[in-house]
Amino acid sequence: MSDSEKINLLSTSIMITEFCDLKCKLCLAYIPYYKEHKHMEVEEIKKMLEKFFKIVNTVDKMSITGGEPLLHPDFCTILDEILKYANRINKEIIVITNGTIEFTDRIINSLKKDSKIKVIVNNYEEYSIYAKANYENLLKHHINAILYTEDNRYGWIDCRDHSLKHINVDAREKQASQCAFFCGKKYVIKRGKLHTCTRSAYRIQENIIPYSKVDYIDLLDDSQGVEQSKKILNNLLNAKSTTSCAYCDGLTEQSIKYKAAEQLER
């Protein structure tokens, strides 16, 4: 295989769970708005990873997200499965947590297994009661970590309006060209399907927008072969926009920023 035929993704997140102990109004994964919530099964993740790395040669950054990933009862096992592909992950294996769950010794020991692991601890003030302690524990064990607070966070945006905004292709592509999510190729695996972003994943899963099977790759579908999946992925990588972009204002320099983690009424 020539270098030109190899596929390297910049960033891919794996949503291992849709459960979260917060109900953030502006959650970019839309967790509070799901009709039902699921954990990905370990066997599903094994199968998904195997197919993913048959399609993709390497990925620069792979993130473990949710929901809150530490709510998954098999978090450590899942991390071990991802670490089997550490030589195919060029830069970082990132774990993103909201600081509501105290790290156990088992979690710390899992996070120490590879120098590529980095933990992002979000501190949402009164909700993230373990954020500072978890961050200090990570540093104590020489685990690469970042603590995000209101002082160093970029701010949240509101992507809850799913109405059609960009009617023709030119308008859609102009919007996509200004969106940090689209331009950064921040792909996400949700329920075993590889999507171009979390907005597209949610809109497709909840049947909010029209879509077809060329808008994502089902990594758990045995009937979709590796070569067919590569073709779809290359088309997505080379596309100037996606179906979802027509329904989105994305993240641009003009995006209004809001305080993080404002909660919905429980």
Image (cartoon, helix red, strand yellow):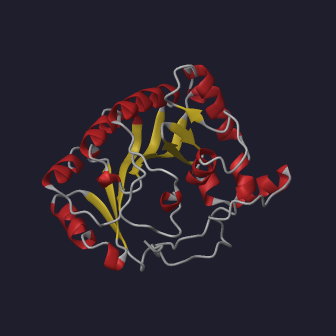
**Quarter of the image that includes the N terminus:** top right
Residue 53 in view, yes or no: yes
Q: Which residue lies furthest to the left in this view?
A: 105
The picture quadrant where one finds residue 226 is top right
**Quarter of the image that includes the C terminus:** bottom left
Q: In this view, does 201 lie to the left or right of 107?
A: right
Tell me what residue is drawn at x 80 percent, y 58 percent: 166
Tell me what residue is drawn at x 68 percent, y 73 percent: 254
Residue 6 lies, with reference to residue 256, above or below; the image says: above
Image coordinates for residue 127, horizontal then vertical, percent: 33, 74
Image coordinates for residue 191, horizontal then vertical, percent: 48, 40
Q: In this view, does 104 lie to the left or right of 214?
A: left
Residue 260 lies, with reference to residue 114, above or below; the image says: below
Residue 114 in view, yes or no: no
Q: Is residue 137 left or right of residue 63?
A: left
Image coordinates for residue 261, horizontal then vertical, percent: 45, 72
Image coordinates for residue 120, horizontal then vertical, percent: 35, 61
Tell me what residue is drawn at x 65 percent, y 61 percent: 250
Tell me what residue is drawn at x 20 percent, y 70 percent: 133
